[in-house]
Amino acid sequence: MNSQYHFKFEDLLVYQKAMSFGEEVDQLVINFPQRELYALSSQFRRAADSIALNIAEGYPGSDAQFVKHINHALHSSNECVSANEKALMREYISYEQREEIRKQITTIQKMLTSLRSKIRQRLSES
């Protein structure tokens, strides 16, 4: 549903992908055992959501602040890799689900790294 109010960071493709990724992880962990509700399920969801949240939080600041938040988003995406592996090891997800999550994380990380490089380049030119 579109809003009549728009924020510039919402135009970033990496933000859009991170938002979708967070929703996919949210659906994935629904099938985790109840005992994981406040453990792996919660940690995985928070890490996945943190990617988009850090992009949004860092966007309106200075370039240096945005780079810092991009780094936080990258750290959260790495946390998702570990949570994904734990989920596979505990047999909460299939190999195919694991690979799909890894594929999405890889795409998001490449986009974040590229965005960070462009901002750093702009910083060095000023």
Image (tube, rainbow, N blue to C red):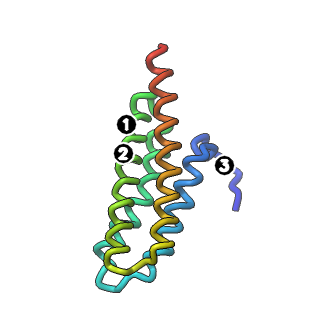
Return the residue nearer the eye: 109 or 14: 109
Return the residue nearer the eye: 115 or 57: 115
Residue 40 coordinates in the image, percent (x, y): 31, 72
Q: Secondary structure at mark 2?
A: helix
Tag 2: residue type?
Answer: His
The residue lying at 57 percent from left, 61 percent from top is: 20
Q: Which residue lies under the disc numbered 3?
A: 5
Residue 49 coordinates in the image, percent (x, y): 44, 59
Tag 1: residue type?
Answer: Lys
**How many discs appear?**
3
Q: Residue furthest top?
A: 126
Q: Which residue lies under the disc numbered 1?
A: 68
Looking at the picture, does residue 113 appear above or below residue 36?
A: above
What whole-number distance in Å separates the C-alpha atoms at marks 2 and 3?
27 Å
User: Residue 72 got which mark?
Assistant: 2
Q: Earlier in the sequence, mark 2 or mark 3?
A: 3
Q: Secondary structure at mark 3?
A: loop
Q: Are marks 2 and 1 in contact (CB under 8 Å)?
A: yes
Looking at the picture, does residue 33 appear above or below residue 123?
A: below
Q: Earlier in the sequence, mark 1 or mark 3?
A: 3
Which one is closest to the eye, mark 1 or mark 3?
Answer: 1
Q: Residue furthest front?
A: 95
Q: Callout 1: 10 Å neighbours few (<14), some, many (20+)?
A: some
